[in-house]
């Protein structure tokens, strides 16, 4: 079977993995709803130049991903499926591309291993079923770095400026997706690779100028027209926000410096385990293969270091590491299969520890939920206890995927890692892939009913009512997307104090958490016209009548 046919089969398989049931759950706060809301507001206002939330400027991201989401919503309607569909397509493209690139670096067999390792790891697979911005951003960075790798080979001298321009196009698109960090990551990777390779003639200054200039021109496709039309204030605020995000803890996402290594170790299981042993040198690698490995290792450490050093730490910030991490893990397994490496027995300890924890969590959750009355007295969080009041049916059969994964982990440790570690790796990745599917289709919809469904269902019930809806005591974007908010239903003062006491020409509905209603209770006792109208699964709902004539 030729590579082109295999690529198409991978694309079809990826479509079957990533597209079905994208709308099985509501979008999740914050990022999924935040991004979908910005795309929805583009459709409502017709303003595709500026990113907005609640019809006010949103400084955090450039518009490229929101344009794609808005197009998806034009086709499929404003819903969860449309918000997540772009990443499903990106997943299909990603798996087909890494097969093609892996085949070019080694051979078709390695390309298949890379696809399996990527799709068969927890978070790398899961993100293609989400509505967050990172899969597109990561793909552009990876493709830009791949073009820089091709440029570094000093081959096809007639096409060198073409490769530099292609690298610039991809990095420019990355800037349009998530901002200047695209140039930061690719630029640092290029510089550090250049130093580590010790070949100062690898790049010519004119080639690097073409790379940087093209990236700048592509990014100016949005930055320049926006500046010419509306002045520098929007771009200035955008840049100011990016700097603040990197240096402050205002977002509430401060974490210790080892946060991202832990996320990658656990979230990229089982690829992360094989990655730990992948740095050993293989004397049979060609010069091109060694250089690509160096590019991938450099990219991995640049991303991990940058996002470990900045103050704000969010799980998906290190997701750019998924490409080099899965590549390196795949090389280790591939070399074992080619009998160039021997499986390191100590890796079995990590496979056993992490695999057993993941498997037991999947197996235990349905069982524990059915006996929640036993452990509820041990939970001190009032909101979490109220969440468990949600009526959700667990048959107990959901535990089967956990026990299956546990069985594969044990078999891998006891038999395959000694007799046939390649077969053990295949079984482990395939079973993890199946486990992710079960988590997405079975576990997450049930868990979502405990965590946020009650609040979202209340907000959806107000879509056709001329009113204002706000949250008190916690931050959310759900009140914008799920009330289908329009400019007419967006108050000029979007603050908690206004929602509580401000003069309003419409009825105001308030959503709070059961453990954060103190301010509301005080106002009700003081005689303010606020009335509690309901409570469900930890969320409390209030109504305040209009205080101005319409």
Image: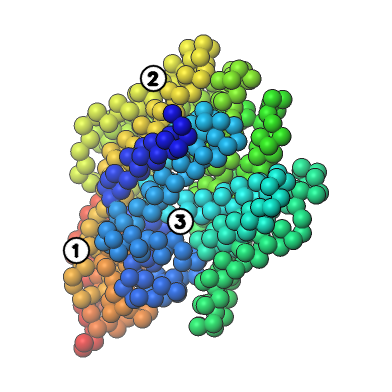
CB atoms of marks 3 and 2 within 8 Å? no
The image shows residue 396, relative to residue 476, as above or below, that is above
Q: Nearer the viewer, residue 248 or 499?
A: 248
Q: Residues within 10 Å of mark 3 (few under 14, many from 20)?
A: many
Q: Which residue in the rendered view is the most extreme toward the bottom? A: 549
- Dividing the picture into quadrants, the one containing residue 75 is bottom left
Q: CA distance from mark 1 to mark 2?
A: 45 Å
List the residue tagged with mark 3.
Answer: 133
Considering only order in the chain, which callout, 2 or 3, is on the residue closer to the N terminus?
Answer: 3
Viewer-side label of 3, 2? 3
Which numbered dot is residue 407? 2
Image coordinates of residue 65 in percent, x first then y, are 44, 61
Q: CA distance from mark 1 to mark 3?
A: 28 Å
Which numbered dot is residue 59? none
Position of 26 compared to 246: left or right? left
Image coordinates of residue 307 in percent, x first then y, are 60, 51
Whether residue 48 is visible: yes
Image coordinates of residue 395 in percent, x first then y, are 21, 32
Image quadrant in which the C terminus is located: bottom left
Considering only order in the chain, which callout, 2 or 1, is on the residue closer to the N terminus?
Answer: 2
List the residue tagged with mark 1.
Answer: 461
Viewer-side label of 1, 2? 2
């Amino acid at each position: 079977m030729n590579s082109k046919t295999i690529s198409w089969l991978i694309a079809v398989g990826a479509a079957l993995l990533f597209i079905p049931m994208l709308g099985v759950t509501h979008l999740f706060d914050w990022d999924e709803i935040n991004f979908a809301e910005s795309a929805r507001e583009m459709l409502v206002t017709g303003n595709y130049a500026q990113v907005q939330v609640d019809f006010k400027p949103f400084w955090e991201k450039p518009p490229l991903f929101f344009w794609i989401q808005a197009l998806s919503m034009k086709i499929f309607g404003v819903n969860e499926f449309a918000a997540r569909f772009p990443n499903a397509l990106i997943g299909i493209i990603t798996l087909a591309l890494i097969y093609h690139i892996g085949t070019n670096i080694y051979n078709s067999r390695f390309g298949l291993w890379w696809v399996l390792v990527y799709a068969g790891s927890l978070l790398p697979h899961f993100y293609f079923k989400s509505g967050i911005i990172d899969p597109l951003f990561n793909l552009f960075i990876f493709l830009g770095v791949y073009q820089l790798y091709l440029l570094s080979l000093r081959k096809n001298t007639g096409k060198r400026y073409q490769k530099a321009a292609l690298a610039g196009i991809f990095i420019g698109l990355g800037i349009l997706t998530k901002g200047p960090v695209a140039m930061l990551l690719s630029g640092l990777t290029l510089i550090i690779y250049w130093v580590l390779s010790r070949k100062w003639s690898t790049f010519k200054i004119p080639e690097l100028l073409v790379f940087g200039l093209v990236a700048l021109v592509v990014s100016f496709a949005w930055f320049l027209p926006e500046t010419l039309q509306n002045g520098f204030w929007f771009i200035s605020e955008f840049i100011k926000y990016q700097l603040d995000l990197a240096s402050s803890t205002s977002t509430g996402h401060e974490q210790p410096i080892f946060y991202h290594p832990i996320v990658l170790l656990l979230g990229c299981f089982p690829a992360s385990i094989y990655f730990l042993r992948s740095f050993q040198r293989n004397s049979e690698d060609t010069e091109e293969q060694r250089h690509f490995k160096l590019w991938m290792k450099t990219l991995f450490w640049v991303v991990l270091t940058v996002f470990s050093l900045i103050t704000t730490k969010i799980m998906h910030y290190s997701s750019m590491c998924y490409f080099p991490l899965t590549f390196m893990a795949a090389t280790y397994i591939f070399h074992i299969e080619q009998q160039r490496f021997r499986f390191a027995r100590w890796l079995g300890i990590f496979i056993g520890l992490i695999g057993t924890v993941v498997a037991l969590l999947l197996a235990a959750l349905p069982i524990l939920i059915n006996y929640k009355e036993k452990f509820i007295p041990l939970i001190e969080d009032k909101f979490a206890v109220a969440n468990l009041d949600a009526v959700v049916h667990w048959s107990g059969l959901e535990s089967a995927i956990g026990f299956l994964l546990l069985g594969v982990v044990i078999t891998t440790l006891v038999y395959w890692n000694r007799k046939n570690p390649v077969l053990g790796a295949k079984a482990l990745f395939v079973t993890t892939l199946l486990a992710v599917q079960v988590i997405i289709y079975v576990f997450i919809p049930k868990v979502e009913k405990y965590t946020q469904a009650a609040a979202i269902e209340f907000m959806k019930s107000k879509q056709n009512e001329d009113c204002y809806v706000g949250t008190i005591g916690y931050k959310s974007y759900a009140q914008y997307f799920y009330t289908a908010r329009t400019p007419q239903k967006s108050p000029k003062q979007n603050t908690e104090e206004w929602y509580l006491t401000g003069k309003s020409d419409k009825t105001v509905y308030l959503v709070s958490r059961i453990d954060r209603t103190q301010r509301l209770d005080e106002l009700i006792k003081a005689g303010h016209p606020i009335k509690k109208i309901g409570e469900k699964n930890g969320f409390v709902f209030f109504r305040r009548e209009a205080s101005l004539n319409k």
